[in-house]
């Protein structure tokens, strides 16, 4: 059975695909478009937080034993 809402969803998904011209790529590479605009600051904060909380896991291999305060 043909469902019109399925066609509408597929057409909506396909309209989201667009070719980006070379002169438009500079707009997409702006720092405001990044998922994490301050990667170094985020890395340092994660390191400090991990050192204080004495966490181990995916963040880094050797963490220090902290007091548990932030």
Image (spheres, rainbow, N blue to C red):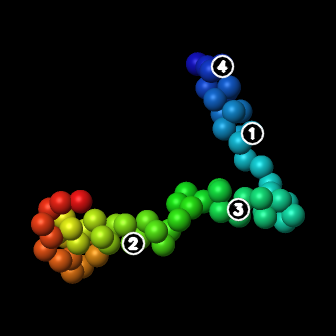
Distance (Cα) linking label 2 and label 4 = 51 Å
Q: Mark 3: give few (<14), some (14-19) or many (20+) Cα within 10 Å.
A: few
Q: Is residue 65 left or right of residue 3?
A: left
Q: Which mark is residue 30?
A: 3
Q: Which mark is residue 44?
A: 2
Q: How far from the left and from the top, in percent, is residue 23?
A: 87, 64
The vertical placement of 19 against 3, above or below, is: below
- The mark nearer the N terminus, 3 or 1, is 1
Q: Mark 2: give few (<14), some (14-19) or many (20+) Cα within 10 Å.
A: few
**Location of mark 4 (residue):** 4
Q: How far from the left and from the top, in percent, is residue 24?
A: 83, 59
State which quarter of the image contains the C terminus.
bottom left
- The mark nearer the N terminus, 1 or 2, is 1
Answer yes or no: is residue 57 visible: no
Q: Residue at x 39, y 72 (%)?
A: 44
Under circle 1, the secondary element is helix
Q: Is residue 68 left or right of residue 33?
A: left
Camera-nearest label, 2 or 4? 2
């Amino acid at each position: 059975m043909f469902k019109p809402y399925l066609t509408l969803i597929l057409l909506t998904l396909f309209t989201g695909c667009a070719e980006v011209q070379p002169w438009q790529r500079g707009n997409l590479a702006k720092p405001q478009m990044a998922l994490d605009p301050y990667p170094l600051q985020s890395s340092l904060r994660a390191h400090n937080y991990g050192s204080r909380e004495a966490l181990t896991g995916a963040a880094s291999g050797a963490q220090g034993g902290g007091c548990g305060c932030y």
